[in-house]
Amino acid sequence: MTTAAARGPEPGVVDPDPVASAPGAPVRGAGPARPAGLAALLPYLRAHRGTLAVVGALSLAGAGASLAQPLLTRAVLDGLTTDRPVTGLVSVLVALVVLGAALGGLRDYLLQRTAEGVVLGTRRRLAAHLLRLPVAEYDRRRTGDLLSRVGADTTLLRAVVTSGLFETVTGAVMVVGAATAMALLDPVLFGVTLLGVAAGVGFAVTVARRVRRLSRAAQERVGEMTSAVERSISGARTIRAARAEHREAAVVSASAESAYAAGLRVARVQAVVGPVSAVTIQGAFLLVLGLGGARVAAGAISVGDLVAFVMFLFFLVLPLGQAVHAYTQLQTGLGALQRIEEVLDVPVEGADDRATGPAAALPPAGRPARIEFDRVGFGYPGGPPVLHEVSFTVPAGTRTALVGPSGAGKSTLLALVERFYEVTAGAVRLDGVDLRDLPREALRARLGYVEQEAPVLAGTLRENLLIGAPEATDAALLTALDQVNLGHLVERTADGLDVQVGEGGVLLSGGERQRLAIARALLAGPPVLLLDEPTSNLDARNEAALRRAIDAVAVRRTLVIVAHRLATVVDADQIVVLDGGRVVAVGSHHELTATSPLYRELAAHQLLVS
């Protein structure tokens, strides 16, 4: 199958990670987030350089057409005062006005299309990066803040391309052209005008420089607000049952007020730029009209020169005001870009791997594998140690149960096999090969994993089943459902396998969600199956059906099962008892009831021994 990565980026969409893939690119995540500058925009614009070259040519042509209009206007006025024919000049002037408008419209359309392409490419790149972050990053960061970076922050890049970057460049071309023409028309009048304009623009730019820092702070507050909303919506049933709607609304309201206050700080700074620009424009016009009128009366310049100078002044101060506003927008966008780059700077899962061996080192896909835990130690980032010197072996093709009190480290062991986290001491091996020496993708292709929470994705029953086996037939899907006693789901409505399961599987019961997750794992047919509390939400009837399904697949697989209900694992080939992150006993059910006080206590509480 040809992957998107092998095909390369789609036309018009930025490469998924142009910086990281560039020769000699710096290693991401090597330090704190750096302030994003104009150079940071270049990778986002690289895929659109052809269109941007056309936009640049259109901008120059439009600027030329605009700058020629004052000179033609002067020629028309001079012709009228000397009774020379001006019909041709008027026609050319009208044509230039129409041409300038047409070029401007085409340029704006191309810019908007490019801006949308930049936003699309950035969102795709950011989403792909987020899905490859280490699991520890999901534990550390708030989901709503990550969503804000994909949504609100990327949207601000649109203004960077349209009203930010190119309005600044186009405005600079117009300003240089108009200033040159004004200096040639009347150096004295231009010098006086330049002093007033420069003072106003300098002040506006100084004020605008604060916008980036304030805008970043405002986006941080928006991310916090999004996190608060996401938490409230995801826990809506719990909140409603606890009659905590008003308290949660107050939390969201407080975060919204914080975002509002941060937005006001940005607005106050931006609001200063507009009046300063307006005063600059109006003051410049009044100065030119007053001083220019005096120079016309003195005979230093003609009326046509003054009119042309005023038109050039218009082409100077208006683009200059737009450029100052665009500069402010650019600072806002660069603040958002810094937040985007901050996430992209986080190394993806596996970036810090030691040199991995070939996938051929793994056992064949259809053969059960042996799992060894060799003096494994582990602690979650920022937390105390969870596992201490854990050693035991899961023979190939056998069923091993992990039991013990809550917090003993059972689920953590499964996470280490999946390489969601790396051991901090010792090693986990698959058929004698250290997992850290194996490619993650090839490793996980041989593992089936069912989490304790058994998450179900929003969508249809079919879509959930196909996550791990995208090529499976409908017949295989129905067989997997029957194995876990879920065949009735396709009979509820005429939609069959296309029946909706709701957000997070809300339209299914807890037991159905758990069995669906198990069916999903079974469908992929992995030689190693990791089950974390597979029967915690099942009634006796469905638990028995699931046990029969597990018995059927256990013949061809290595199974590791975390269980609190010992009745489901009493027939396991071996039971590993953990307590406080240590292995305290290993054996069969009968052996442990005789030799392990902790296991006997657990079994007695569940009425398995007298």
Image: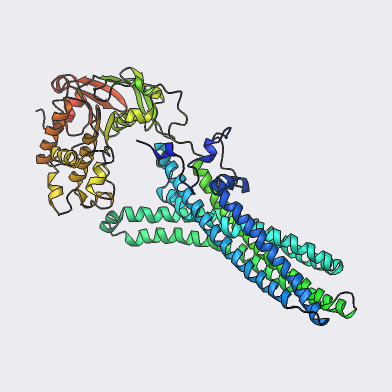
536 vs 255: above or below: above
- Looking at the image, residue 123 sits to the left or right of residue 395; the answer is right
Estimate the x, y position of residue 170 in percent, counting from the top left.
66, 59
Q: How is the image coloured?
A: rainbow
- Looking at the image, residue 554 sits to the left or right of residue 393; the answer is left
- Looking at the image, residue 126 sits to the left or right of residue 511; the answer is right
Estimate the x, y position of residue 485 in percent, counting from the top left.
12, 41
- Looking at the image, residue 310 sits to the left or right of residue 105; the answer is right
Q: Answer whether residue 280 is visible to the viewer in this image.
A: no
Residue at the location (28% across, 54% down)?
Answer: 238
Of residues 557 and 425, the one nearer the viewer is: 557
Q: Answer whether residue 217 is visible to the viewer in this image.
A: yes
138 vs 319: above or below: above
425 vs 492: above or below: above
Residue 197: name its quadrant.
bottom right
Q: How many marks?
A: 0
Estimate the x, y position of residue 255 in percent, counting from the top left.
45, 58
Image quadrant where one finds the N terminus: top left
Residue 240: name its quadrant.
bottom left
Of residues 549 and 67, the one nearer the viewer is: 67
Residue at the location (68% across, 71% down)?
Answer: 278
List the single residue furthest toward the top. Answer: 432
Of residues 479 and 60, the one nearer the viewer is: 60
